Structure formats: structure tokens, C-alpha cells
Image (cartoon, rainbow, N blue to C red):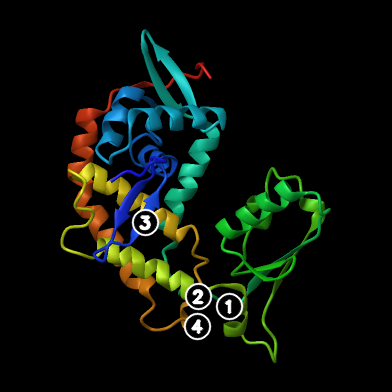
């Protein structure tokens, strides 16, 4: 089930592959079983959980080490054992992911016609700053309308989106409505690849809307982690376009029902397995980085 680069590979009924990176799985694991618990988890028990999905011990240890370097995890040593707890940064990332999964929903049914526009201009040499800004905008639901101009449906808190990038002086932010001859549907088709968004939801349904999803894994803890990771990767790239301008059979509607039903089905047995497997200790303020 695991490829040479340690990605977990899920397949639909036709055999089409969907790779999942160990760090994405780790974030789902932390969000489901560590966030808001005030605890740190033993690396050996994380290795046990990830082995259920075909991820090697070496890949787990490498992922944990990289996340420490990125200030997403902090080490807590207890004798010969190393435990890993959340940082303020990772807690914020995980809560944002939780809100994206459970709060906003996959379909925007209450749009009032308002668009948020972000125009930016920066020196050509600022490749990393431009990449970081675009990544933040995509996560916040923006699409590129034309060079240097991005739009998103609704009123977006842009200062929160770009916080910490130091680019405020290079941005122009506005709220606006479409005016003739431009129609909202035209803006959507120009700024967003609607066909690709729909195709991703259909691929999700191909993997999960079936009698035995991910049959290669052994238990519901692994299925829950794969399900949540797959869904979060999907909704984080979905700008939640206005429902009134989408087809009536928009696949996100059925995909969200499938996700919620399976998550509820896996919840109790997955928690029972996690409680049995995970070795945790209280996370102390002072830790080994």
C-alpha cells in the first residue's frame, strides 16, 4: 500500500491511485487524537498507528523530526522515551482544519453576491514571498482571475489570511459585486477550474462511496485517519463556490454526506483502538525542541 517515497496510496474501484503524504496523515492524527487534550504522545505508539497504513518506522520518525523543525511539534522526554506535543502554531493549524471540515461545509448556500478582491504587486525576485501568498490565498478560497488579481466569493478576512507574511504594503484589498456585462458565473469560470474541482469530488466518491473502502487497511482507526486526510485535502482546495451557480448534481453534496456518514461509523471503534494503543503524558510548558 506504500510507495517507495512512503506516501500511502489509496485506490478507487477502477484502481486509480491517490497518494497521501505521511505529514498530512500526521496532521489528521494530531487533530483527531491530540488537539485540545493537553497531552504529548509517545513516538512508539505513533509508529504503531501508522504501521496500520503501511508507513514505515523510518518515515514516521522522519516526519516527526521535520515537524519539530517547522515548529509544528515539540519534544517531551520521559526517561528513555520521547513524546511529541503540539505547539501554538500546530494547534492553530489543526483548529483551522477542524473548522474547515466541520464548520463551513462543502457547499456555499448563503452567498450574498459579494466578492473579495486581492491585487498584489511585488518585486520579480520575491519568488518565495509570491509562493507563500498564493498558497495562503488558495487555502482561503481565492482563485486567480488574471495576473496579480485574485477573487473569492464572500467577505474574506484578508489580514488574517496574510498574517505574518509582511506583505500588507504590497496588497490592495476590496469587496465588490459583479456589474454588467460581467456575470458571477463568468467570474467563477475564469478564476476557478470548476471541472477539476468536480473531478476531485468524484474521485473521492470513487474511493469511499463503496461497500468496502480502502480494503487494504486492517481497522477503523486507519480508515478514519485516511478518510479525514483525504477529505481535508479535498476541501482545502475547494473555494466553496456559490451553490446557485453550480450544477444541481454538484458532487460535493453527495461527497460530504458520504464523509460525515463514514466518519460517524468509524468514530467509536477508532477511538477505542486509539485509547488502547496511544501512550500519552501531560504536555509540560518546558520541552526539548
**Helix, strand or loop for disc 1:** helix
Q: CA distance from mark 2 to mark 1?
A: 8 Å
Q: Is 264 on the left or on the right of 17, as rendered? A: left
Residue annotated with mark 4: 245
**Residue 268 placed where, x, y %?**
19, 45
**Helix, strand or loop for disc 4:** helix
* Residue at (46% x, 49% y) in the render: 97
Q: Is residue 89 visible?
A: yes
Contact flag, marks 3 and 1 (Cβ < 8 Å): no
- Relative height, residue 239 to residue 84 (above, below): below
Q: Is 190 on the left or on the right of 93, as rendered? A: right
**Helix, strand or loop for disc 3:** strand
Contact flag, marks 4 and 1 (Cβ < 8 Å): yes
Residue annotated with mark 2: 194
- Relative height, residue 121 to residue 152 (above, below): above
**Residue 44 placed where, x, y %?**
31, 23
Amino acid at each position: 500500500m506504500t510507495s517507495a517515497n512512503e506516501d500511502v496510496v489509496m485506490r478507487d474501484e477502477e484502481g486509480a491511485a491517490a497518494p497521501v503524504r505521511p505529514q498530512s496523515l500526521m496532521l489528521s492524527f494530531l487533530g483527531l487524537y491530540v488537539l485540545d487534550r493537553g497531552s504529548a504522545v509517545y513516538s512508539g505508539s505513533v509508529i504503531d498507528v501508522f504501521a496500520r497504513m503501511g508507513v514505515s518506522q523510518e518515515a514516521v520518525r522522519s516526519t516527526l523530526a521535520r515537524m519539530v523543525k517547522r515548529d509544528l511539534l515539540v519534544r517531551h522526554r520521559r526517561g528513555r522515551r520521547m513524546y511529541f506535543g503540539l505547539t501554538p502554531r500546530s494547534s492553530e493549524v489543526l483548529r483551522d482544519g477542524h473548522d474547515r471540515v466541520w464548520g463551513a461545509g462543502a457547499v456555499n448556500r448563503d452567498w450574498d453576491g459579494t466578492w473579495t478582491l486581492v491585487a498584489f504587486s511585488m518585486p520579480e525576485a520575491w519568488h518565495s514571498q509570491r509562493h507563500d501568498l498564493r498558497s495562503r490565498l488558495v487555502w482561503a478560497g481565492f482563485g486567480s482571475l488574471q495576473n496579480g488579481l485574485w477573487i473569492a466569493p464572500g467577505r474574506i478576512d484578508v489580514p488574517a489570511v496574510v498574517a505574518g507574511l509582511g506583505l500588507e504594503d504590497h496588497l490592495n484589498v476590496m469587496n465588490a459585486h459583479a456589474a454588467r456585462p460581467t456575470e458571477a458565473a463568468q467570474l467563477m469560470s475564469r478564476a476557478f477550474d470548476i471541472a477539476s474541482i468536480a473531478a476531485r469530488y468524484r474521485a473521492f466518491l470513487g474511493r469511499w462511496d463503496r461497500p468496502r473502502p480502502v480494503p487494504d487497511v486492517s481497522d477503523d482507526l486507519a480508515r478514519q485517519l485516511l478518510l479525514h486526510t483525504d477529505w481535508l485535502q479535498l476541501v482545502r482546495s475547494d473555494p466553496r463556490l456559490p451553490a446557485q451557480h453550480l450544477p444541481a448534481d454538484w458532487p460535493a453534496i453527495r461527497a460530504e454526506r458520504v464523509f460525515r456518514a463514514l466518519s460517524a461509523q468509524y468514530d467509536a471503534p477508532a477511538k477505542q483502538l486509539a485509547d488502547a494503543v496511544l501512550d500519552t503524558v501531560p504536555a509540560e510548558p518546558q520541552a526539548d525542541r
